[in-house]
Image (cartoon, helix red, strand yellow):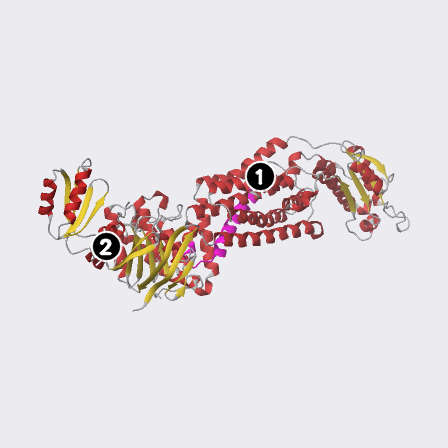
Amino acid sequence: MSDKNYSYKALFTPRLWYLTIKNIKSMFRDKMQLIWIFGYPLLFMSIFALAFGGVSSRQVYKVAVINEDAESVPYPENSPYAMASIIFIDVLESKDLEDYVDVVSVDDYDYEEAYKLLQVEQLDAIIEIDSLFTESILFYNQSPEVDVTTAADEVTEGVIGSIVSKIVDEIIKNAHNLTISGDIETKQVIDTVKLSAFDYLAPGFIIGSVLVCISQISAHFAEEKETRTLQRLSTTPVRRRNIILSAMVSQSLVAAIQISLMLFLAIVVFGAYINPNANLILLFVVPMLFIFTALGFGLLLASIVKSQGTASGLAWLIILPLQFLGGVYFPIDNPIQNYIPTYYAAHAMRIMMLNGQTSWEALSTDILILAGFGIILTIIGILLFQRKSAIN
Amino acid sequence: MSIAIETVQLKKYFGNIRAVDGIDLKIPKGSLFGFLGPNGAGKTTTISMLSTILPPTSGSALILGYDILKDAKKVKEFIGVCPQEIVLYERLTARENIHLIAQMHGLRRADYKEKTDDLLGKMNLLERANDKVKKYSGGMRRRVNVLMAVIHEPEIIFFDEPSAGLDPQSRRAVWEFIKDFQKKNRTILLTTHSMEEADDLSDELVIIDYGKIIAQGSPETLKSKLGEGDVIEFKVNEEDREKREEIISQISKLNFVKWVKKVGKGKIILNGLDGLRKISEIIDAVKVQMQDVSIRKNTLEDVFLDLTGRRLRD
């Protein structure tokens, strides 16, 4: 053994760090890669903003309301308070909203009857007002429960969900001045309905852009195989998992830049709608969580391809089904979407951006399923890549 | 004598192709051991197995006593590999490429920073050390390729055709570098299909063909087996084929001639102590025009030719 000093105590972290730096330098010194990293989100979002930004999704949505709010709320004596659910329905039926919402029934149908009408497209949505609606607002100062059922159509779900959410917010804001003739500000509610198709599609675009990681990481390893640098690294004591992790870290960094850029372009430059209650950090975190799924797919691909050209080509065989079967851009009415991770990522993004959902209750299903997909695919990807490329 | 590399019936088959077919080696520590053979003889495959990136089909190999399969991670700590192809990160500088390998071997910055510059200086690359290697000439890239194998001062270095494609000046620089490195008591395994390289650098070498060792010894020992005389190589007119056969027949009968080989269409080489004048007479007698003649000392190429009937470059 020579007299060199090995820093064995810190074998794992420094090597991972050095490899990550190497990957980042290589990426950022390649003009074509730079164009790809920054140009892709710019081009992608610009094209979609141009294509869909001017198309209004405005239509009159036919809605049935089922009001289960308790009829005998124990109001204080001589109270001016009215039932909040009545005010909710009044606003929904108001002249201001008649261009957007047509309340075809209030308590004319039970849920099953209404659902049958929904299935034959005679209704666009069913709004169920919970029995504790007024009580929650007036006495417990809590958001009441309102269930919205729509066809498997993200746009309708987004519009009706936003309208309901806005009206409820306005009622809560004015909770102590509510009368039967309570005057609820409808301007904000109408603004919600004025959203363009781009506003509804933008959350999906961001998820769609993350999928490009599949192509990037598989092309990265294909290049390492083609140029034999992976083999050269294999003659050093560095572990294969360090090599894989370093690629994942550097690709995640690029994806983080792309996600930030997409959010900035969508919201600031192209003015995509973002619910005032939306949490920007969550809008960044959910796509980042989805990156693990994309990288897992990328590693699976990287384990079988040997050239960059093959990697880039085959990547689209994974990306396209994930985009379209997961309803990233256009909603699909097919149970297959339940098995596609992009569906959960896009759904989470939409309810966060359009409906302003931030609660764990609303997001937990999507986040847990995404985390599950991410963990499983990453582990399978790493194991397969290690096995297939350990010895060439 | 302690052994640095030991293989026992090491084999590697790719389907029906026997790339390496039962190699037994014992390479002493501190020696510069040559692997001479034509392209496709199994040299690179052997190095790939010894450097743990290719598992053998059968047989075993120990590097400083560590098994290449069971103790692969340990083996990697002791070796440096200079691959036959130039393997660099194109968008990194020469300095960054060398640093990366040092970092992968767990060296501290203080240990590799100055050493890198020292090595770059020895290879006349210091001035352009911060240029991306994709801007380098082929010779410069190959020199970086060599430095990446030695930055961590490994006990054993595998040089796989280290001077392939280099101009004579760069080749000489690489050879000197390898010799200097050996002086530090490192064990070097050098593969080459260049007889000059093997002859000039190796303490001991094996000649390998079709995956098998066909001869082993020091360059001098191997050459001496062909005799102490000179090699006379001459070329006659191609159309005089029958007369050429006659010349070979007559020359073979001369008592001072050790061997005669036909090489290509018109060339004949032979080994003899002193016979140019006599040979000239024979050629004149059969009225064949001699186009070219040379007299030289034995080379390893002649050894290979003697063993296989082919030239190394065939």
User: What secondary structure is the magenta-colored segment mainly?
Assistant: helix
Q: Look at the picture and state if A193 lies above or below B233.
A: above
Q: Is residue B112 magenta?
A: no
Labels 1 and 2 in the same subunit: no
Nearest the camera: B44 or A218? Answer: B44
Q: Position of residue B80 (x, y in %)?
A: 36, 58
Residue B199 tag number: 2
Indicate which label's residue lies in the foreground, 1 or 2: 2
Q: Chain of mark 2?
A: B
Nearest the camera: A357 or A315? Answer: A315
- Classify 10 Å Cα crowding around label 1: few (below 14), some (14-19), many (20 and above): some
Q: Residue at x 10, y 51 (%)?
A: B274
Any part of residue A167 in sight: no
Q: Position of residue A262 (x, y in %)?
A: 57, 41
Which segment did they paint magenta? A233-261
Q: Looking at the picture, which amino acid does disc 2 mark?
A: Asp
- Classify 10 Å Cα crowding around label 2: few (below 14), some (14-19), many (20 and above): many
The span from disc 1 to disc 2 (Cα, nearest Å) is: 66 Å
Q: Mark 1 falls on what kind of element?
A: helix
Horizontally, is B86 left or right of A292 in the view? Answer: left
Q: Position of residue B169 (x, y in %)?
A: 23, 48
Nearest the camera: A304 or A131? Answer: A304
Q: Residue at x 19, y 35 (%)?
A: B239
Residue topped by disc 1: A265
